[in-house]
Amino acid sequence: MKTKEMHFITENIKKLTTHIPESVKIIAISKLKPIEDIQIAYDSGHRYFGENKTNEIKMKWEKLPKDIEWHFVGHLQTNKVKYIAPFVHLIHSVDSYRLLSEINKRAIRNDRVINCLLQLYIAEEESKHGFLLEEVKEMLESQDFANLKNIRICGVMGMATFTENKELVRKEFQTLHTYFKEIKESYFKDCEHFKECSMGMTDDYEIALEEGSTMVRIGSAIFGERDYK
């Protein structure tokens, strides 16, 4: 690994941690990035990494230090849960009861309780996934949900519209934070683990921080642009 590349990743992490509050967790999105780049970030002291493909996160988990906290941040298919259930720290993208039920089933088989975020639909883009607020309420009030003993709901996640309209992005983040507070007050008031409002990526995390984000997903601002070829 070239010294220049090592310096680039290390300096980017240092720069982010100087102006992002310590109370906010930075998830380094390492998808499509080689093991060597993640190791550089790890050696600089970073421990939180996010991936969106089950085969890729499993491979990296097998090859990298075991004190890394792995976050799954992409759309997760139910038939792929089994690949990450033994080790994943937090699944950000739970967008249906069916998926939550499968996570619970796989958690039982691995003798674990798996942390999850409920993904809420806040964007104006139809391509985005997520629960509507009323769907979340209906699920949380159901006996089916009460029977899931091996999942832990730690908060909510949402993705804003991909746009240069910053006021729209801000409005969507405000909506998510309002949902977070409402769900917390109504269903998890006494649960210390329900504390995460995950929103904000490289292009919009500063707005997300202003609107109450506790967890940001930063990729290119750490590792540089990805080659999707």
Image: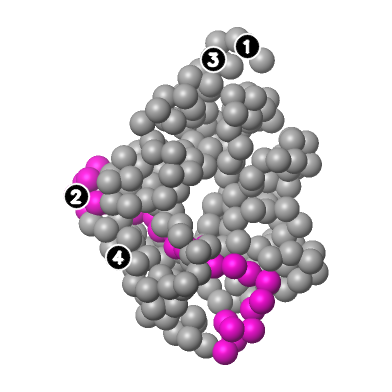
Residue where numbered disc 1 is placed = 2
Q: Is residue 142 left or right of residue 2?
A: left
The answer to whether residue 131 is left or right of residue 29 is left
Residue beneath label 3, please? 7
Element at label 4: helix
Measure the alpha-carbon separation of dots 2 and 1. Answer: 40 Å
Callout in the foreground (3, 2): 3
Q: Nearer the viewer, residue 84 or 33?
A: 84
Please tell me whether mark 3 or mark 1 is closer to you in this view.
Answer: 3
| Marked residue nearer the N-terminal end (1 or 4) | 1
What number of labels is visible? 4
Residue 106 on image: x %, y %: 74, 68
Q: Amino acid at mark 1?
A: Lys
- Circle 2 is placed at which residue position? 167
Towards the viewer: 114 or 80: 114
- The answer to whether residue 48 is above or below residue 224 is below
Identify the mark nearer the N-term, 2 or 1.
1
Q: Quadrant of the C terminus?
A: top right
Within 10 Å of disc 4 (Cα), the crowding (few <14, some 14-19, many 20+) is: some
- Judging from the image, what secondary structure is the residue with disc 2 in? helix
| Residue occupying image coordinates x 30% and y 65% | 178
The residue located at (49%, 27%) in the rendering is: 13
> Residue 201 appears in which quarter of the rendering?
top left
Chain-order first, disc 3 or disc 2: 3
Q: Which residues are magenta?
A: 143-170
Which label is found at residue 139? none
Residue 86: x and y in percent read: 76, 57
42 or 99: nearer the eye? 42
Does residue 164 show up magenta in the picture?
Answer: yes
Q: Residue furthest top?
A: 3
Q: Residues within 10 Å of mark 3 (few under 14, many from 20)?
A: few
